[in-house]
Image (tube, rainbow, N blue to C red):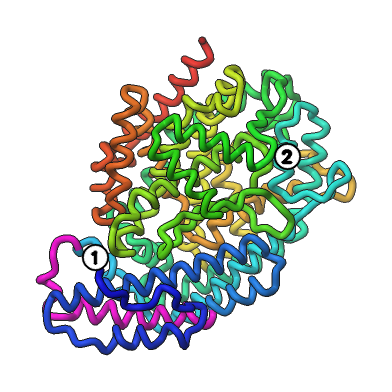
Amino acid sequence: MSLRFAPDDLDASKWENIEPYLINLKEREINSADCIIDLIQDESQLTEIISETRARTYINMTSQTDNQEYQKAWGDFVENIQPKLSEYSDIINKKIINNAFVDNLPERYAVMLRGIKSDIKIFREENIPLQTRLSILGTKYNEIRGKQTVYFEGEEKTLPMMAIYQENTDREIRESAWRVTTSRILQDTDKVSDIFEEMIELRHQIAINSGFSGFQEYIFAAMHRFDYSIEDCLEFHDSIEYSCMPLKNQMNDFRKRKLELDKFRPWDSSVDVDGKKPLKPFIDVNELVNGCSRIFHSMSTELGDFFDLLQKNNCLDLESRKGKAPGGYQYYLQKSRMPFIFMNAAGTQRNLETMIHEAGHAFHSFYSGHLDLIHERDAPIEFAEVASMSMELLTHPYWEEFYEKENAIRARVKHLRGIIQFMPWMATIDSFQHWIYKNPSHTRSERVVKWLEIQKRFGSKIEYGGINKEGEDLEKIMEISWQLQGHLFGAPFYYVEYGIAQLGALQMWNYQKKNSDNALKLYKNGLSLGYTKGLTDLFKASGLKMSFSKEHVNKLIKGVNEQLQEISTN
């Protein structure tokens, strides 16, 4: 790109600054394929600037949910800019697709054009205010979750800080921590259900407006799921039940016997079965960052240098604090070509895995950052998660940077067992969403029944009977535990991607066990393509197979279990 279409210092937080450039794109004459290419390039450059403004506004909002200025700025963007961008995006998309010269575009644009056609198919102007309302409701959910703190051991603590207590070897402390945390969660359950029910109604209406029978079909088109179907997801659920549930049940039965438990309670699922203290890989975020830097430099100079750029460019917000939204994410700053990592670190092994996971996303952003167009850098979510989940496994040999040998082995075992435990949870959330949006007019009580039914299929055999003390109703957590999964609110149907990506990550891990240099080469090959290829082709570029069959899933899960058996006998 030679001359910049929009100035890099354009203030994209104000609609009046953006609109003239969009009018230019809208009214531009197109009389050749080169004109379309120029239009695509200029729109991409403008979108980079707007995207980065959105990113920084979102980061501010989630970093301080109790900051009214940040909340207002996010609300202004969602209500006053995003809706108008949707309208112009549809106009420009149609300008491209309906032009006689579009068939003369090079193959480079094929993936992008397929996505544009899908976007045109689903766009309806009447959906814009509904989507705006959904964004506002998502912000309300984050505000509720960000305000959830408890007093424990004489201090106010966020819920992410409370997670460490579930690994405490003192069962009374675990139970006390679980009770106070659960009690706080249940205070907001009706408000959260109200938000979710309005979201269901809005999403269903959006789908109907766009000509779909329901939100299931709509979201597959909206998320550009061209390489797999609703039926594939249901097959995946069956494959997980077949492959993972026997192992998950065995692990939980072993845990109950080893801990000599009368009843397997919710506060018994994370503690070390040998009575060892919780894994604590770091005390503060500086230790976390420095240790990860050493790991990535040990793997390759390139990965280490990429990671160090995050700290040098103030692109890390890692500590947990009051008012900070829960969870973690990587957000790519498109104009700066820099990834930003957000998480809530409290010193746990899970925090370490989250840091490595988000670093994998950052590496994906770095590897695809050379691509010219924003569309080309925005890889499908399923493959984006391959980048992050592969990195969790590829770093296994280097976890001694945080632990002595014995605890590093414990951490690896915990992570591998977590994969077997996670896949059914993924199927739980995905199955729940398929039912929710196939039955959008369901009642709250029907939702409870379905959730418990799915939990019975994929969940742990935790015993809640008789758990309540006087004045408590903590058993209700069984009925509403789905409320803790933020994806249901902010990113509907975004969850099966983790399962698909885990299959890819396990294959990448198998390559590493044979040849670590080759694994990193394959990793880079796929990530460097961004979204210039479709999902199946991106898997192939990294030497990975995409399949939902029982045979494929079982083979990979069996490999995890064999590795666990090998570790336990050494």
The answer to whether 532 appears left or right of 190 in the picture is left
Coordinates of residue 477 in the picture (x, y in percent): 70, 49
Residue ID at (35%, 59%): 378
Coordinates of residue 505 in the picture (x, y in percent): 39, 37
Determine which residue is flagged by label 2. Answer: 464
The answer to whether 450 appears left or right of 224 in the picture is right
Q: Residue furthest top?
A: 570
> Which amino acid does the dot numbered 2 rest on?
Tyr
Q: Main secondary structure of the magenta part?
A: helix
Q: Quadrant of residue 486?
A: bottom right
Image quarter where the N terminus lies is bottom left
Mark 1–mark 2 Cα distance, whole angstroms, equals: 49 Å
The answer to whether 534 appears left or right of 157 in the picture is left
Q: Which mark is residue 114?
A: 1
- Callout 2: SS: loop
Q: Which residues are magenta?
A: 79-108
> Which amino acid does the dot numbered 1 rest on?
Arg
- Picture layout, residue 131 above or below residue 28: above
- Callout 1: SS: helix
Q: Nearer the viewer, residue 64 or 143?
A: 64
Q: Quadrant of residue 300?
A: top left
Q: From this viewpoint, is residue 179 visible? A: yes
